[in-house]
Each structure stands twice: as structure tokens, then as C-alpha cells.
Amino acid sequence: MIIDKLLPTDLFRGKTAFITGGGSGINLGIAKNFAALGANVAICSRNQGKLDTAAAELRKLGAKVCTAAADVRDPAAVAAALAKSAQELGPADVVVSGAAGNFLCEAEKLSPNGFKTVVEIDLMGSFNVARGAFEQLKQTRGVIIFISAGLSWLPYTLQLHAGAAKAGIDNMMKNLALEWGAYGIRSNSIAPGYIGDTEGTSKLAGGPVLDAVLESTPLGRLGTVDDIGQAAVFLASPLASFITGTIAVVDGGHYLGGSALLNAAQRQVAAAATASGSTS
Ligand code: HXC
């Protein structure tokens, strides 16, 4: 982590970040970046065991931590988690809606319940979090950040369900920017690319797919959880005080994938031409 060497370690002192999916992966990475800058951190996920392990890591960074087990599909459970966080840490200044579920499945084999399950976790879950956090965010004139993905605006094969859910999230994010701007609440999304050492990338990008990801990413590497944590910190900080209604794409340029593949082929042609002494 480099954030505490680049930004003041008291940037979020006295502020609270509430993060769903915060027990692991990208969302735990986000939690750690806030913790390293002095924030109190509430993490919420279905699995209390994962939350306990994550909380120990966050406390080592000096954070005051609240854990709240809840399934984001259950609005009452989300409301209870937010209430517990507010009671222990004060109202949330930053809310990160990162809990997600996903699997690869051909459209023609996807069951209605499979589609519904991912939409309920990602899209309905994000609504439940945003709606449940409104009074706290209104009080703090806070920030909400949704974790989206490139498949929100580009189709990815075997990802119809997740793409539909993420597109819905980004549309909702913009509506909230529009309506809640009046309360000083900012609403943005982060669209991570493929991030190393996460359940998402190991589930979705095995073997040759991983090679294709690297080939089609101009920066030529997988992302890290800190890449996403740093973007979240920026969006939540006063540095971004006029930024709302946007999607921050943090993917090493992977969204340019089609062009990146053509570009790589073009370079091969140019290199071959140079090697053969041809000028055309
Ligand atoms: C087809 C599947 C399936 C699969 C589940 N289903 N897995 N269908 N292929 N591999 C179907 C089931 O058959 C069932 O429908 C329905 O989905 C619900 O399944 P359950 O197992 O009962 O659901 P649940 O226990 O709630 O689990 C939810 C889950 C699970 C999404 C299926 O994988 C999960 O909880 N994942 C959480 C962690 C996770 O996935 N993280 C990675 C996020 S990555 P039927 O019809 O049989 O009843 C991410 C990144 C996106 O979001 C962008 C990357 C670039």
C-alpha cells in the first residue's frame, strides 16, 4: 500500500466509511486504503468469519472497525447493519456498495433464478444500500461509490446477467447524483478491470482468457486491489468535491480492448516490415 506515503494519514480522521463486500477482495482493499488514512471502517458481508479476519487486518492499520453480517438482498438486514455502524462509528461519510455475485453462464442456459440472483445481489443490493444509507449521507453530506464493471456498457460473453445488473447500477448512480446533489451527496461508480488475487478474476478469467486480458490491456498487467482503493479514496476526498455522476474506469485501458488487439497486430506488421527492410 502506498496511499499513506502520498496523502496525509489523517485525511479521513473522524470520518466513517461503510463498505459492503468488505470482508475480502477489492472491497477489503478499499477498506484498507481508507483505514490507512485514519477512517473508521464498517465492513458488511454475509460471512461473519470473513469479516472477523478482515477486521483484524484493518485494526492493525489503526482503524476503529465495526463488522455487520448482512445479505444485501435483504433491506431490513442492510438497514440493521447501517444502524449498527452508525451507533458504533457515527453516521457514514462514505458508503461503498461493492457486494457482488457472479458466475460464467451461456445466455441460453441461464435460469430465471440465476439471472434474478445476480440482479438481486448487485442491483437490488446496491439500491438497498443506497436507500438505507440516505439519512446518514444526508447528515454528513457524504459520498456513495458503486462498484461497477466494464460489462456495464460492453457485452462480455457468458456475462449477460452481470452486465444487466451493472448497467442498472450505473444508471441508478447517475439518478442519485441528480436527485441527491441537492443534499450535497455525491454519487459515482468505479469500474475495475481484471484485478489480481480476487475471486472475480479467478472465477471469470482462467487460462487463455487471462492471456487475452493481458494482451488487450494497454498497460499490460492486472490491476491490484490498491489501484481500486486509491480511486475510491480520491473520489471520496475533497480532491473530488465537484465530481458526481461519473464512472471512474480503473482498468489499465482494458475497455479499449478491441483497439488494443488491433494495435498489437499492427505493431507486429510494422516490426515485420522493418525487419524485411520494407518502407511501406
Ligand atoms: C449457472 C448458476 C451458477 C453457474 C449459480 N447459478 N451458479 N447458474 N452457472 N455457475 C444459479 C443456480 O443454479 C440458481 O438457479 C441461482 O443461480 C442461485 O444460485 P445459489 O447458489 O442458490 O445462489 P447463492 O447461494 O445466493 O449464491 C449466489 C452466487 C454465488 C452469485 C451464485 O456465486 C455467490 O454468492 N457469489 C458471491 C461471490 C462472488 O461471486 N464474487 C465474485 C464477484 S465478481 P436455479 O435456477 O438452479 O435455482 C464480479 C466482477 C464482475 O462481480 C466484473 C469482472 C470484470
Image (cartoon, grey):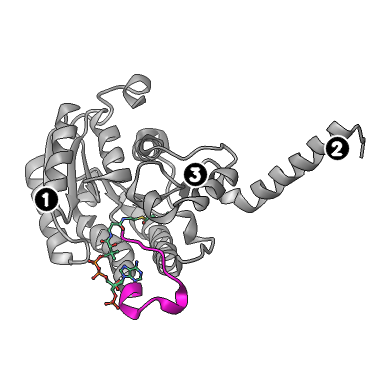
In the rendered view, tell whether residue 175 sits above or below residue 262: below
Dot 3, how many residues are within 10 Å of its Cα: few (below 14), some (14-19), or many (20+)?
Answer: many
Q: Secondary structure at mark 2?
A: helix
* Kind of residue indicated by mark 1: Gln
Q: Quadrant of ligand 1?
A: bottom left
Instruction: Please tell me which of labels 2 and 1 falls first in the chain.
Output: 1
- As measured in the structure, the alpha-carbon distance from the residue carrying label 3 to the one carrying label 1 is 30 Å
Q: Nearer the viewer, mark 2 or mark 3?
A: 2
Dot 1, how many residues are within 10 Å of its Cα: few (below 14), some (14-19), or many (20+)?
Answer: some
* Residue shown at the point (36%, 24%) measured from the top left: 2
Asked if the residue at label 3 sits under 8 Å from ligand 1, the reply is: no
Residue matched to label 1: 48
Q: Secondary structure at mark 1?
A: helix
Instruction: Please tell me which of labels 3 and 1 falls first in the chain.
Output: 1
* Kind of residue indicated by mark 3: Asp
Numbered badge on residue 251: 3
Instruction: Specify the quadrant of the image occupied by residue 29.
Output: top left
Residue matched to label 2: 273
* Kind of residue indicated by mark 2: Ala
Q: Are marks 2 and 3 in contact (CB under 8 Å)?
A: no
Query: Of 108 and 231, which appears nearest the observer?
Result: 108
